[in-house]
Image (tube, coloured by chain):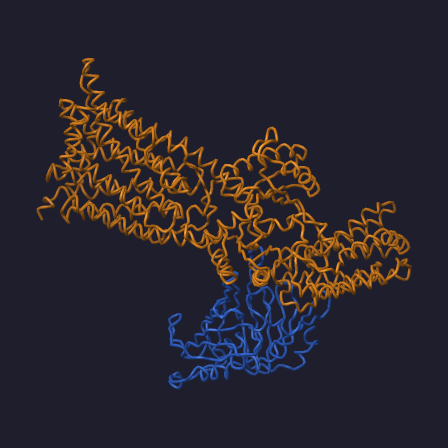
């Protein structure tokens, strides 16, 4: 039936070439119109099964909470410079629209957060303190004259950090960070005392700032070393909106570059999902375009060199392009958009789809070179090469299509598009290339040109194969030993779980991602949990804070304590207010107060020293280093001891110290009292009283649910850390989602998909081969080189230092579909030529499969140059795999063909 | 009386395996417990922790225990940064006192501090203090015997008794049948008995002064993905310790 079909096809191509091409043109125009609507989306969730609960929850969060798509802007430089940079850039960022040039168009940024909501802290600061911390701090506010204040500060320090019976102690990041902030405030306070001591003319502003730093803390999101400042820009759109994501990130680049000219020593960077998504897309788009072009040109050159003609290869590329366009149209109808995996389909089809044309042109040129007429050459070509093309095309296509049984969308859609695409390319080659060749040859005949010149014969392949056949046993033993050698190395092949290793190398948003991890001791990738009740959010937050590995838990409940907590705190707050109101005015500092004040400073030194001891023992490096900004590093003679220097300095001139401290106290006293009184607001407040700057970060757009963000302390791209983080999240809420959860799920799902698809693809190929050959012996003969080639490929990957990853693991089932073709074509020819015709088989079909392997390797090899390392690794894997499958097909089948006719056995 | 991992693996006597073939879980843990607490003990140990920057930090300290682990004193020897710093655990870690040589001050921790991580390690104070908590705080059930680290083991499940304030809701323990050394222990979250939080690996067992002594312990915190290694450099079970050592004065020495 197949032979009859191919014969009819040859007849149609010869008799009605224009009709066939006309029909193809109509289909191609329709497909092109459909394909032009294809979009590219680079989100992790696009690869996940739609029914996966983590994906559903993730998409739900992205849709319902704009804050989940926040763009993180990092400014790096001197502290004062980056603060000014942030303040100047913020209004411009907030006004970004879809049309940056004239400011018109749709707004893209809803709000920019440069620092914490100070007004709310000033009005409700004490209600936000934990009851225990409030109790510890109670005395601190009862009398804010310098001597009692320093005493209270020490009492509070010891209760909170040194003699604490708080179960969290300093072992959590939150506690450690609070201690660091507290030390920062104290340091500024002590430095202010010194400034007053050294400068009698100092501005009173210094005392006010010292008060704010002690009571409210640092309002900017600064890194531990205070050289990186983070700004969060909440978009008006979801990160799933590709066009707006790109527009917003581009506009931010423009604004930050422009404003940055005023701050030449500062630099900026964008990270977060929006920025990473944009950067990936830009890289992939530009790479895909030029690499596809380069692959096409290289293939064209190979054709021209191999076939000594340029028109036929151009026709082959044209036919291939038509196959790709049909596939684009199909993709637009079936999946609508391309993702990280399906984006590669064009390059893969270029590499694979050209093979069909190779066999057709090779056969046609060979026959015409022997003096055959056009009709005869076309019929002969389709009769001889057609079965191999159809079997090869169908096995490859169906092997790809087996991926559609995958649970993950990425793999399933890739299987569908690549599988159908390869079959489309095969159909395009079989139906369109013969009429194009016929038209071309008829025109040449009209112009009385000679028939095509004989092609380059590649005799060396035939000679090499004959040599292999002659030493068949030695060759087979060597092949077996090589396979064992590569199998040994396959066992050492590792899997790289680091998702960032798949991102484009040097991609700005990834570099900044790493910088933030180091600067803030937390991963910028976070997990998300939602709930419809505040009580449930409180339970989630409490549980999450029990895990030291969760660096930050960010939730609305941090701003709105439970009613019972508010009632409990209100009692203490009222006492604080009452004591402060009755404490009277500032009391002058006398000479007799100097020693008690210095004793309190010395007590502070002891507290900080002990804190540094505990931080050292507990391995809390950040806190330990912060302590050394105030006290000397033990064992280091040259290490400055700021507090002891102050004590010594102040003690040298008690009268100057007394005068200076009186000025300092006079300047801060009223402001300190007023600030504390304002913060000591005992009134109960509800969610409705919170400002929108806070609620919009945590409350869904419809007001129905609340969002908790949990930032891991460790790098979650390390697999062990990721698994540990996920275990914590599952114990907090089974609904937890976010990039870390999706990535882990993707690895699990795609790992299972890959194994299943590989097994299904292999057995499907065996079945198709059996249907084609009707002989178990021939079926196995085709499968053995494939298996050996796959083992060689895996071993070679290890030898060249490559690892498997989420991107390239998909290529293993693919290589089964691709690698089988060489054996199929050779065995088909062997059945025609018969035993002992090794040289003939390999000189003709061997040449075709070699060109075919080279074109495929060019196609995949070009992927290896992509800066998206995941895609590049897939290209390299396929490049190696195609090469090894070709070599094993040669090395195993040539000796086998030299034996007694296999189907006779 | 509380029972600690440390004393459990430090001091376990020999038992005749044949005698234990038909023992219940309670009998196995009781037998093990009877020999877990040597009257006195002095050791020099090494502890390796991972700091928040991911670097290894090694501490060497001397440890003293008396009254079957009711009192324990740990004093740091190395690095020089920590030398002289000491921790006194009394009443099976229910009273914890710390001494800072840099300021010459002493601090007292509250009772429930025993559940806290000890000095940046993955061991809690209650893992370090002596006692027989395995009996007083947990109900024991014997599970199917198992093979761990190529060794035939008794498998025990310990469920926290109602009203106990022990730091773990559940423990799984694999004890070497030949000597009752717990080779492997799984710790479950204080609140969630299904949440596996830590695993202790015990190895390098040597018989010292007639007592099988595990010279290496690794506690893996599965949630934090962190590990703490403890090694015994030397140990003496026949030492005579003075009660004065376990006082604030002893702490300061």
Residue drawn at (52%, 54%) of the image: A527
Q: Which chain is blue?
A: B
Picture coordinates of residue B138, whole percent (x, y):
51, 79
Picture coordinates of residue B57, whole percent (x, y):
57, 60
Between A748 and A866, the residue placed more toward the observer is A748
Residue drawn at (51%, 64%) of the image: B221
**Quadrant placement of the N terminus of chain A:** top left
Between A58 and B196, the residue placed more toward the observer is A58
Residue drawn at (40%, 48%) of the image: A805
Between A740 and A417, the residue placed more toward the observer is A417
Picture coordinates of residue A289, whole percent (x, y):
41, 31
Determine the image quadrant of residue A608.
Answer: bottom right
Residue lying furthest left:
A904
Q: Is residue A377 above or below residue A557?
A: above
Q: Colour of chain A?
A: orange
Q: Is residue A557 above or below residue A362?
A: below
Let me know if residue A296 appears in the view: yes
Between A374 and B60, the residue placed more toward the observer is A374
């Amino acid at each position: 039936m197949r032979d009859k079909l191919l014969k009819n096809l040859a007849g149609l191509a010869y008799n009605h070439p224009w009709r066939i091409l006309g029909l193809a043109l109509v289909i191609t125009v329709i497909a092109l119109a459909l394909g032009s609507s294809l979009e590219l989306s680079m989100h992790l969730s696009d690869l996940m099964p739609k029914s996966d609960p983590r994906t559903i929850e993730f998409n739900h969060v992205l849709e319902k909470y704009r804050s989940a798509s926040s763009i993180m802007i990092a400014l790096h430089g001197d502290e004062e410079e980056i603060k000014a940079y942030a303040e100047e850039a913020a209004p411009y960022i907030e006004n970004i629209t879809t049309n940056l040039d004239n400011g018109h168009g749709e707004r893209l940024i809803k709000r920019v957060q440069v620092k914490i909501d100070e007004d709310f802290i000033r009005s409700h600061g004490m209600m936000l303190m934990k009851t225990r911390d409030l109790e510890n701090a109670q005395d601190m506010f009862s009398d804010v004259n310098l001597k009692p204040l320093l005493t209270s500060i020490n009492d509070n320090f010891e209760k909170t950090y040194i003699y604490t019976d708080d179960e969290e102690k300093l072992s959590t990041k939150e506690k450690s960070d609070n201690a660091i902030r507290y030390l920062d405030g104290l340091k500024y306070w002590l430095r202010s005392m010194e400034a007053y001591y050294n400068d009698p003319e100092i501005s009173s502003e210094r005392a006010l700032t010292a008060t704010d730093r002690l009571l409210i803390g640092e309002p900017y999101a600064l890194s531990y070393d205070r050289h990186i400042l983070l700004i969060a820009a909440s978009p008006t759109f979801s990160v799933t909106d590709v066009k707006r994501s790109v527009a917003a990130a581009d506009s931010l680049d423009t604004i930050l570059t422009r404003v940055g000219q005023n701050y030449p020593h500062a630099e900026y960077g964008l990270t977060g999902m929006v920025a990473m998504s944009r950067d990936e897309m830009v890289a992939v788009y530009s790479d895909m375009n030029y690499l596809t072009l380069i692959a096409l040109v290289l293939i064209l050159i190979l054709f021209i060199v191999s076939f000594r003609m340029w028109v036929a290869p151009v026709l082959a590329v044209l036919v291939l392009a038509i196959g790709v366009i049909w596939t684009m149209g199909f993709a637009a109808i079936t999946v609508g958009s391309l993702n990280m995996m399906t984006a590669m389909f064009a390059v893969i089809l270029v590499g694979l789809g050209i093979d069909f044309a190779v066999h057709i042109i090779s056969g046609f040129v060979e026959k015409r070179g022997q003096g055959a007429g056009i009709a005869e050459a076309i019929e002969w070509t389709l009769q001889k090469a057609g079965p191999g093309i159809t079997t090869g095309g169908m096995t490859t296509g169906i092997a790809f299509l087996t991926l559609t049984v995958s649970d993950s969308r990425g793999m399933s859609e890739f299987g569908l598009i690549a599988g159908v695409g390869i079959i489309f390319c095969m159909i395009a080659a079989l139906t369109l290339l013969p009429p194009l060749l016929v038209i071309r040859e008829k025109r040449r005949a009209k112009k009385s040109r000679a028939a095509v010149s004989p092609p380059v014969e590649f005799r060396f392949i035939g000679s090499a194969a004959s040599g292999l056949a002659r030493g068949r046993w030695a060759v087979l033993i060597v092949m077996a030993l090589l396979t064992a050698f590569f199998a040994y190395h396959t066992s050492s092949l590792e899997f790289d779980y680091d998702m960032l290793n798949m991102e484009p190398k040097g991609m700005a948003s990834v570099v900044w991602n790493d910088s933030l991890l180091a600067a803030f001791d937390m991963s910028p990738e976070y997990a998300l949990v939602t709930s419809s009740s505040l009580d449930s959010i409180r339970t989630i937050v409490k549980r999450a804070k029990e895990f030291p590995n969760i660096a930050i838990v960010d939730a609305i409940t941090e701003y709105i304590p439970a009613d019972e907590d508010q009632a409990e705190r209100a009692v203490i707050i009222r006492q604080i207010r009452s004591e402060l109101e009755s404490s009277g005015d500032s009391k002058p500092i006398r000479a007799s107060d100097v020693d008690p004040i210095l004793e309190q400073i010395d007590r502070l030194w002891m507290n900080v020293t002990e804190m540094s001891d505990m931080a050292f023992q507990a391995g809390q490096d950040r806190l330990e280093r912060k302590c050394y900004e105030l006290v000397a590093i033990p064992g280091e003679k040259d290490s400055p001891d700021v507090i002891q220097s102050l004590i010594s300095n102040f003690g040298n001139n008690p009268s100057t110290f007394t005068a200076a401290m009186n000025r300092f106290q006079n300047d801060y006293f009223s402001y300190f009292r007023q600030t504390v009184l304002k913060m000591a607001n005992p009134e109960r407040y509800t969610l409705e009283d919170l400002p929108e700057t806070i609620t919009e970060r945590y409350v869904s757009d419809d007001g129905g649910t609340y969002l908790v963000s949990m930032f891991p302390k460790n790098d979650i791209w390390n697999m062990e850390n990721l698994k540990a983080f996920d275990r914590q999240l599952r114990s907090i809420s089974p609904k937890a989602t976010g990039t870390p959860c999706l990535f882990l799920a993707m690895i699990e799902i795609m790992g299972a998909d890959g194994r299943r698809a590989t097994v299904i693809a292999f057995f499907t190929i065996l079945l198709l081969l059996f249907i084609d050959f009707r002989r178990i012996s021939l079926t196995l003969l085709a499968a053995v080189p494939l298996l050996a080639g796959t083992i060689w490929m895996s071993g070679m990957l290890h030898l060249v230092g490559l690892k498997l990853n989420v991107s390239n693991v998909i290529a293993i089932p693919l290589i089964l579909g691709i690698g089988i073709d060489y054996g199929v074509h050779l065995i088909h020819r062997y059945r025609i030529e018969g035993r002992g015709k090794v040289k003939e088989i390999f000189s003709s079909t061997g040449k075709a499969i070699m060109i075919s392997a080279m074109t495929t390797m060019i196609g995949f090899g070009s992927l290896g140059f992509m800066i998206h390392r995941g895609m590049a690794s897939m290209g390299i894997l396929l490049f190696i795999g195609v090469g090894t499958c070709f070599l094993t097909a040669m090395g195993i089948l040539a000796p086998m063909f030299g034996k007694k006719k296999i189907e006779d056995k | 009386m509380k029972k600690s991992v440390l004393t459990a693996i430090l001091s376990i006597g020999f038992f005749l395996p044949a005698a234990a073939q038909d023992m219940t879980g309670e009998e196995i843990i009781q037998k093990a417990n009877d020999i877990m607490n040597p009257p006195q003990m002095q050791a020099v140990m090494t502890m390796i922790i991972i700091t928040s920057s991911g670097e290894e930090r090694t501490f060497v300290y001397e440890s003293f225990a008396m009254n079957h682990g009711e009192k324990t004193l740990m004093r740091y020897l190395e690095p020089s940064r920590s030398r002289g710093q000491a921790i006194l655990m009394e009443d099976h870690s229910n009273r914890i006192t710390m001494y800072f040589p840099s300021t010459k001050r002493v601090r007292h921790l509250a009772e429930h501090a025993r559940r806290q991580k000890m000095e940046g390690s993955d061991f809690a104070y209650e893992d370090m203090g002596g006692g027989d908590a395995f009996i007083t705080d947990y109900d024991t059930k014997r599970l199917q015997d198992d093979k761990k680290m190529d060794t035939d083991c008794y498998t025990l499940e310990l469920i926290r008794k109602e009203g106990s304030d022990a730091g773990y809701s559940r423990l799984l323990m694999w004890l070497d049948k030949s000597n009752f050394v717990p080779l492997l222990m799984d710790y479950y979250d204080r609140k969630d008995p299904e949440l596996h939080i830590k695993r202790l690996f015990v190895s390098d067992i040597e018989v010292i002064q007639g007592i099988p002594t595990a010279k290496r312990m690794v506690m893996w915190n599965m949630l934090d993905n962190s590990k703490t290694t403890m090694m015994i450099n030397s140990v003496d079970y026949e030492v005579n310790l003075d009660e004065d050592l376990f006082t604030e004065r002893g702490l300061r020495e």
